Image (tube, grey):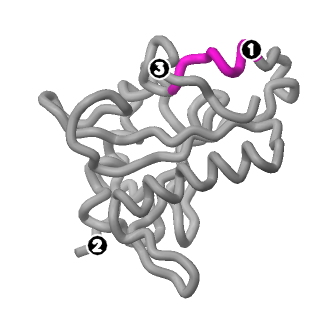
Amino acid sequence: MHEAVYDRPGSLITSWPVAAEQLNIIRHLLDPETHGGERPGYLETAVSHIFLTGASRLILKRPMKTRDSDWRTPQARWSWCNERCMRAFEAGEGASYQALPVMRREGGLHLGGPGKLEDCLLVYRPQASARGETANQAQNAPLPGRTAPSTRVIGV
């Protein structure tokens, strides 16, 4: 079952249908409270939902199968996120990538931490020097929805 996502009644956010299993995740990621009160930007592609928050881009793969890839399960999307992180690291890209799980626990959905895996986001941060930061500042900046980093960001 696919649905559309509305910002408010009558104000459509998505152009393409949204898989029912990702509907609440997208609503959570569109909520400014998830990002410390900042309203995120939103873009969509045929294969992803992209949320723009400050210096970060949160990429949520759509649950789908293409000729070359199969992202129909949260575990498959988690694997894709980790593979993308490793490719960026091996290629020596200046940008940083991190796999960030979307977890369900008491109180609803949360970015990271304990709970049941609902989905996975690829967190992308542009090269530190392009934003006027040192690599250390970029690496230690908090992830969206967090007050302090919980893991090292690869590739900075």
Mark 2 and mark 3 in contact (Cβ < 8 Å)?
no
Q: Nearer the viewer, mark 3 or mark 2?
A: 3
Q: CA distance from mark 3 to mark 2?
A: 34 Å
Q: CA distance from mark 3 to mark 1?
A: 15 Å
For badge 3, the amino acid type reads Ser
Disc 1 on helix, strand or loop? helix
Disc 3 on helix, strand or loop? loop
Q: Which mark is first along the chain, 2 or 3?
A: 2
Main SS category, magenta section: helix
| Residue that protrudes farthest toward the front in the picture | 90
For badge 1, the amino acid type reads Asn
Tell me if residue 101 comes above or below residue 26 in the rendering: above
At 48% across and 60% down in the image, what residue appears?
A: 61
Tell me if residue 43 comes above or below residue 56 in the rendering: below
Q: Nearer the viewer, mark 2 or mark 1?
A: 1
- Residue 19, position in %: x, y? 31, 67
Q: Which residue is mark 3?
A: 150
Which quadrant of the figure has residue 73?
bottom left
Q: Crowdedness of circle 2 by 10 Å Cα count: few (<14), some, many (20+)?
A: few
Q: Which residue is mark 1?
A: 136
- Residue 65, position in %: x, y? 45, 79
> Start and end of the magenta stretch?
136-143
- Report whether 79 appears left or right of 88: left
Q: Which residue is mark 2?
A: 2
Q: CA distance from mark 2 to mark 1?
A: 42 Å
At 23% across and 75% down in the image, what residue appears?
A: 1
Q: Is residue 80 magenta?
A: no
